[in-house]
Structures are given as C-alpha cells and as structure tokens.
Image: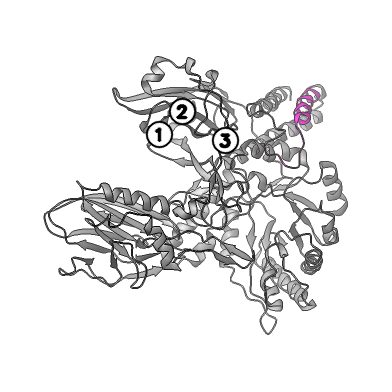
Amino acid sequence: MRRIAVALILMLMPASVFAAAYLYDMGSGDSAIMDDFTRVTDTSAFTPDAGFGWDAAAGMKPYVQVYDKPIFNESRGSDQPPPIYTNALTEDCVIGSEARSFSIALPAGEYSVYVLCGTSHNQRYQYFDFDVAVGDQVRTVRFEGPYQFRNLRFTAKTDGTPLEIGFGPASKWVANAIMVWDAADGGATEANIAELEAQMYGLPPEEMEKWKLSPLPDTPPFPEDALSRHDLFRGFVIYHKPYLECIYPNTNPYAHELNPTLRIFATPGEYEPLTFAVRTLSPLTNVRVSAGDIGPIKAGTIDVRHVRYMKVRPNYSMFHSYHIAPDILEPFDAMDLPADESHRFWLTVQVPPDAEPGVYDGSITFSTDHRQQGRIEAVIPVKLRVLGITLKEDPSKLYGIYYRDPIDSWVNATDEPSKQYFLRKAEMERADLVAHGTRNIVMSAWCRPADENGQFTADWTGLEKKLELNEKYGFSPPYVVSINAGGVYQKYMKESPGSHLSRVKMPPQEYFDEMTAMTRFVESERVNRGWPEFLYYPIDEPSTQETSVKYMTELMKAVRAAGVKTYVTADIAHDAFGPMMPYVDVWCMQPFSWDRERVIRESAERGIEFWCYPNHISGENDHTPVAGARMTYGFGFWRSGYRTLIPWIYSADVGDPFNYLDGSSMDFMNRHDEDGSPMPVALWECFREGYDDYRYVYTLQTLIEQARAAGRNAAADKAQQELDYVWNAIDVQLKYKYDGLWAPEEFDVYRWLIARAILELQEAV
C-alpha cells in the first residue's frame, strides 16, 4: 500500500525530469527512492568510482517513518489523517551528531544546489541546530522536532574537483535530499521542485482535491477616484482600519481611510497595537517597514510584524473545507507582495514605565524597490498620548491558560543544546504570558498507578522545574493539575474510557479507592515540597450521558476524599451534571453559562468558584473573532462574575505547525520562531487588549472607593456615572464572538471614557 501511495504522488510528475541533474535521496537501505534519485545511507562513504558519498561513515543514523494513509485514533475510535503526508524524499532521512561532508564528483562548471532538511520520524525532544556550507556560503538551519522541512539553495563553481556540502551540528543535523544541476539549465528541475514543495508544505494533490476553498468576505469597491498620480506611480496606497476589523487579501479601503495618521493612547508600562495596511496596485519587491522613536518609546523596542494569511479550517476538527484568514504576526526583514492585495503590518509598542504624560509625535516608514527611482517610501505619522495613570490589577481575578510546557521536552531531551533550547523556550513563553496578563497555567501531576504493594512512584523533575519558573515569573496559584485517572482506569478495566468518557463503564470500588490514594500521595508530595495549592483535575470534559455522570460523581468524590480541592471542565448549566455538585470546588465552563447574579450567589452559598475556558475565541473554532476576544477578556469578563479565564490553549500543534490543513486536527494559536521565541497570532494580542480594558475598569473602581472614603462623593458619583454608562452599553452574552458587539472603533472610545474619568477623579482626590 505504501508503494502504491508513493507511486500515485510520483505519477503526477513528468518522468525523468531530473535526468540531467545529480540527485541524492538520504535514508535507509530499504526506504522508497524518488524517481531519478540515487540512494544514500549512513554507510555511503565517498569513493571515486561511486562519485558521491560521505567523508566518513560514522556519527550518523537513518530514520524512516512513512505516512501515507489514515491512522486509527483509539481515543476517538476512528481513523484520522496522519500528522503529515510523506513522499519518497520526506519519509526518510539521515541524522548526524558529528560534522560530515557529502561530496559529489562533477565536471567543471557552475551549478545550483538544493538541500532538503527535515524528518517525519518522531524526534519530539530534538532541537535541530546546524550549518550547511557550500564553499564560503553558509546557511543555518534551526527547527524543533518532526514534521518540518527546510530547503536551502546555494550556487557552486567547480574546477573538476568534487563538490563538498558540509553539515556542521551545534546539536544534530538532518538531511533528506541533495539536488545539484547545471546553473544554466534548471527549468525542468525548478518546476519539479515547485511541485515537491507544494506537497511538502501543503497536502498531496489527491488529498488537496478533497478540500474546498470558501470565498473571501465581500469588500467595498476600490476607491479609484481617491487615487493620486503619486499613488499610481509608486504602486500602492497606505490605509488604516481598526485592528479589530480583519483585513483579507481582497479587502479594499474606503477613501477616508487612506493616508492615515495613527493615533494611540496608553499608560506607562502598557503595550498597545499600532497597525496599518498597504493595498498594492502592482507587485512590490523588497518591502521593508521601520519605525523611528515615538516620544519616549525608542525605535529599537518597537516590534514590527506582518500579518500572515493562512489556510484555516472552520473548526479545528473539521476536514475538507478551508478559507484564507489573517492569523500569524510574523517577523520579517524584507518581503515581496503581489499586485492587487491588501496586507496589514502590526507593530507593538510599550510605553516605558517611567514615561512622562504628554502628547508625542513619531512615524513609521514603509518602503519598497521601485523600477524608476530605485527605492520609494511612504511615511506614516504617529500620535501618542501617554496618560498619567498607573493601571491596577484586580487580585480577585485570575487569567490562566492551558499550556503544553517545553519543560516536558527539556526533561526528555538527550543532548545539551536541545535541553538548553527547551529551557530557554519555556522562559520566553512565560515572559510572553506575563506580558499578556496571564499568570497561571494548567500542569500535570502524573504518576503511575499503584504497584503490587500499593505504592506510588513519580518523577517530579519536570513539575518541580515548572513551578520554579512559575515563581520566577510571578505566576499566581492555585494551579490546576491533571492526575492519571485514565491510567488507573486502564489498570482495572483493560481498556480506555474513550474521548469525553464515550466508552466508560463503571469500574469496581477498588478503582475509586486507588484514586483517593493517588491523590493523597500527590498532595502529600506537594505539602512536603512546599509547592503552591493544587486543584485536582482527573478527567477532561466528561459527557452528560448517564454512565459518564455516575462515574464522574464517584471519581470526584474519591479525589475530594483525599482532603483536596477539585476542578472539572463541565457546564453546570446542564442539569445532568447536578449529582457532581457536592464534590466539585471549581466548575470551569466554556461559555459564561450562568448570569452574574447566579454565579455570585452560588459562589457565596456553596463556597465554590466558576471559571471559564472561552474556546470560541481561542482559535479552536475560528481564527478571526478578534473583537469577541477583546470583549471576552475585558468588558465581558467584568460583567460575568466569573473568577478566572483559562482558554485552551497557548499553542496547539499536530503536524507541521505552519500547515493548518494537515494532521488529525488544526494547529492554532501562537506559533514559535526558529529560536523558540513566541510568534503571536492576532487573537493573542487581543486577549491582552481585553486584559488592559479590565485594568482600566478596576483602576476606576478602586479610585471611586478611595474618593468616597475621602469624602469626595460628588466626584465619585460623576465617575460612577461614566462607569455605569459603559456597563449598560454591554450586550451581555454567553459567548462574545461576532454578533452583538461594539463596532471595532468603539472599543477604544469606551476605554477612553474610563481613562478620562480616572484622570478627572485623580485630580479631585
């Protein structure tokens, strides 16, 4: 079957298009070989007779992992697509831990060289960091784990001596293929490479045919009458829409949005988006964006990114339907833009904590190559108002997030460069979480089921490191920790309970007794080691079916019997979950299912908490509800009465993290750069804007209380009227997504009303 799938891919390519090239497929002795390629293994040492090979057959190992058909998912009980689809080049590779060079005997001449680097093999805990050198040209390759492929291009000139391609590892190197061809005759080779890359970075043609592209949203006609001769000459126009209004490739500006002055206000220490868009009239090459100082904000501190369009699914678990959406805020130095498209550029500024209040000027420069002038630019004015306000945090509220911690890979990595990478990544992500107002993550306190003597053992290396870093970055407990209820269930029932307990059966009492004992063991370890409070989380998202609820009721009762607090992801608005109520301390619901009054009443009467994981605005279902994200995190959270927002998830990866169509489900939320630094998506930035909205609200609430305590009741009443006005302007909803929201430009208007009231009340007090 595997050979048939490979053959189907190759049948789509013209036969022997590579015949005039030197082509090498790295892998094992029995993995598939691409047509016209020569097999290379870890033992293929160079000899003059062979005309190719390694300088030494040592320090290397081949890996093979074929993905050409669906894989059975036991939890879901069905076949699912593989993480990626492989072809004869990507299904295998050679990985090396020592410096090696690959030599090719060539006639004298000039050549183009293409090197493909990546692996389909599950190298989950490996960070690849290496150089590839051809002559004096050196390219650095860095990426994490499997399912990613990097292509490198070089030029080479030989006098008849063998061409050497060097691999120098900082950690390990990986190679799938090397292609070399006459630099003057590469048309067929380039065409074939284009087909290979379309499949490697997308889907095989026979799979892609199953997917239907949805049309882009409608856009108003382009304002031709508003174009100047200068616009036509330079080949683009600059415009601005509020960042809460998505821009797509086909988006056209309105005339009043052209040639904008960008205006923002912020408090010392606050981050703020600063965005603009370009609509191209002709192709643009070597596009660059730079910012100068904006008052107290120094140019070097301004983060400049391009909003990258991605092929996204309507829901993370759907197949065969996709659309184009603005998503990743990617860093860039220079880029090319096609004609007749809109592209947004997203700059993030942070006002220095010691900045003086005032109004400041600055500018952003957009530039591109020009056929007549060599280089042409547009300068976009910026107005910044720094407010004399110190925003306060509400200690009764908590922002958390589900999180796949790089520390788990740090624990399992086998070489020091990889361990350092994962540790550095964990620190960078925690710093990013704090910068976005998030100071809590979900973790695991996993241990094996009890042994024959009823004893539990656990390796706390990872958990201890996570807690150490959490403390370093100022995180706030309590922490939700999952425990191994599924493993103990498997021990007694010899099968999985299924996704959302879809196949659960009632286990014997011994199961529940062991869950009490396991929880007691983990809790004793927590106390003895001086760790912060845990909320125990045995099962995720149980279903409402009768056996599921019966099992969960007994399970939560058993866990709570260990003298701990419990946490469940279940919507108590469903009456079916009622039997669990006496045994749950924290109910985490997807929407704001209960109204504010009921949440506050039930919390007070029962001594329990209500948290929310708003997955409808975290990329799981859609990548574009940016206004809904800001409303959920700020004004909506304020109105809800819930204590915590804790969405799924900081970053979800399945296959290639930059291909949302491969794998059993869609990748979503934040990506990461080659050095492990966070690469945010627009939704994540809007989480922070909502968090800041709530800080403005809480700051005003605090000042009103202070004013009343100081006898300034008239000033307090006036400020309260402003706050009540904003409160009443909110259309309270279970889920803030698209409908019933303020217009994109109104969010900052309401924030400004609160900011102005703060400034006035500060003067009065």
Q: Nearer the viewer, mark 3 or mark 2?
A: 2
Task: Name the residue at the right extreme.
Answer: 605
**Place of residue 655 in the rendered image (x, y in percent of width and height, measured from the top left):** 50, 57
Magenta stretch, overall SS: helix
Quarter holding the C terminus is top right
Count of numbered badges drawn on the protein:
3
SS for callout 1: strand
**Place of residue 96 in the rendered image (x, y in percent of width and height, measured from the top left):** 34, 66
Q: In 3D space, how far apart are the residues under numbered discs 3 and 2 (Cα atoms)?
A: 29 Å
Tell me if 78 is positioned left or right of 656 in this view. right
Relative vertical location of residue 374 with respect to residue 604 in this rendering, above or below: above
Tell me if 197 is positioned left or right of 752 in this view. left
Tell me if 565 is positioned left or right of 222 in this view. right
Front residue of 53 and 260: 53
Q: Are marks 1 and 2 in contact (CB under 8 Å)?
A: yes
Q: Which mark is residue 337?
A: 1
Q: Of marks 1 and 3, which one's residue comes earlier in the chain? A: 3
Q: What type is the residue that disc 3 sits on?
A: Gly
Q: Which residues are magenta?
A: 715-737
Q: Nearer the viewer, mark 1 or mark 3?
A: 1
